[in-house]
Image (cartoon, helix red, strand yellow):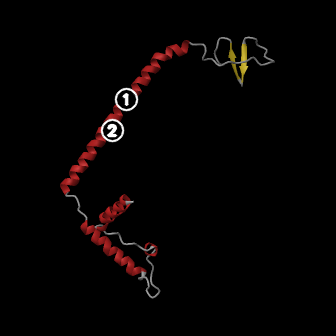
């Protein structure tokens, strides 16, 4: 029991120097800004004029760039635009060249292949046995459309 009393006394000594935070009421945090019954809002024109005055004050506080700063930043933007224009143009030309190269290399292979001809079934009532008919077009057995 002696230990519990001494432990409590030591804790009380520790906390004696501390100040406790003030207790806030729950209602104080719920207070909202409301107009009192006896006050009116300002006229809309007066509020608009007040707004314009505040805008004017804010513009006066703004730091505007100097003429040389504007010129310097404009040159940087133009240089970046020129750089990206050249890069995209070169990539476009390279891609067009590679596509044309691919088309010229694969063109002889595709023209010699017979698998590109459409599959056509014979229709009943054909009088000429050497030709096939498909949807208003006729195909002779040599593989040419008539």
**Residue shown at 45%/16% (left/top)?**
105
Which quadrant of the rendered structure holds the N terminus?
Answer: bottom left
Question: Farthest residue toward the right?
Answer: 125
For image coordinates 62% across by 17% down, the residue present is 117
Question: In the figure, 43 relative to 9: above or below?
Answer: below
Q: Residue drawn at (24%, 50%), measured in percent from left and top?
A: 73
Position of residue 136 in the picture relative to residue 71 (left or right): right
User: Which picture quadrant has residue 18?
Assistant: bottom left
Quadrant in which the C terminus is drawn: top right
**Residue 93 tag number:** 1
Q: Nearer the viewer, residue 35 or 41?
A: 35
Residue in front for this viewpoint, 78 or 143 = 78
Q: Is residue 91 left or right of residue 141?
A: left
Height in image: 100 above or below 22?
above
Q: Is residue 142 above or below residue 24?
A: above
Upstream in sequence: badge 2 or badge 1: 2
Q: Is residue 58 left or right of residue 106?
A: left
At which x and y percent is residue 87? 32, 34
Q: Nearer the viewer, residue 107 or 83?
A: 83
Q: Which mark is residue 85?
A: 2
| Position of residue 8 measured from the top left corner of the image (x, y, whole percent) | 36, 62
User: Label 1: how many residues lie within 10 Å, few (<14), some (14-19) or many (20+)?
Assistant: few
User: For the view shown, which residue lies furthest in the front direction?
Assistant: 2
Quarter location, residue 86: top left
CA gap, disc 2 and disc 1: 12 Å
Determine whether the residue tagged by mark 1 lies in a helix, strand or loop.
helix
């Amino acid at each position: 029991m002696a230990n519990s009393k001494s432990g409590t006394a030591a804790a009380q000594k520790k906390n004696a120097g501390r100040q406790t935070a003030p207790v806030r009421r729950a209602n104080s945090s719920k207070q909202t800004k409301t107009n009192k019954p006896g006050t009116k809002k300002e006229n809309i024109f007066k509020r608009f004029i007040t707004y314009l005055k505040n805008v004017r004050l804010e513009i006066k506080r703004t730091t505007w760039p100097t003429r040389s700063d504007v010129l310097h930043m404009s040159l940087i933007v133009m240089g970046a635009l020129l750089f990206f224009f050249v890069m995209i143009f070169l990539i476009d030309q390279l891609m067009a060249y590679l596509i044309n190269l691919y088309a010229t290399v694969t063109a002889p292979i595709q023209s010699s292949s017979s698998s590109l001809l459409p599959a056509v079934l014979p229709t009943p009532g054909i009088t000429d046995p050497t030709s096939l008919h498909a949807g208003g077009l006729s195909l002779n057995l040599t593989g040419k459309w008539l």
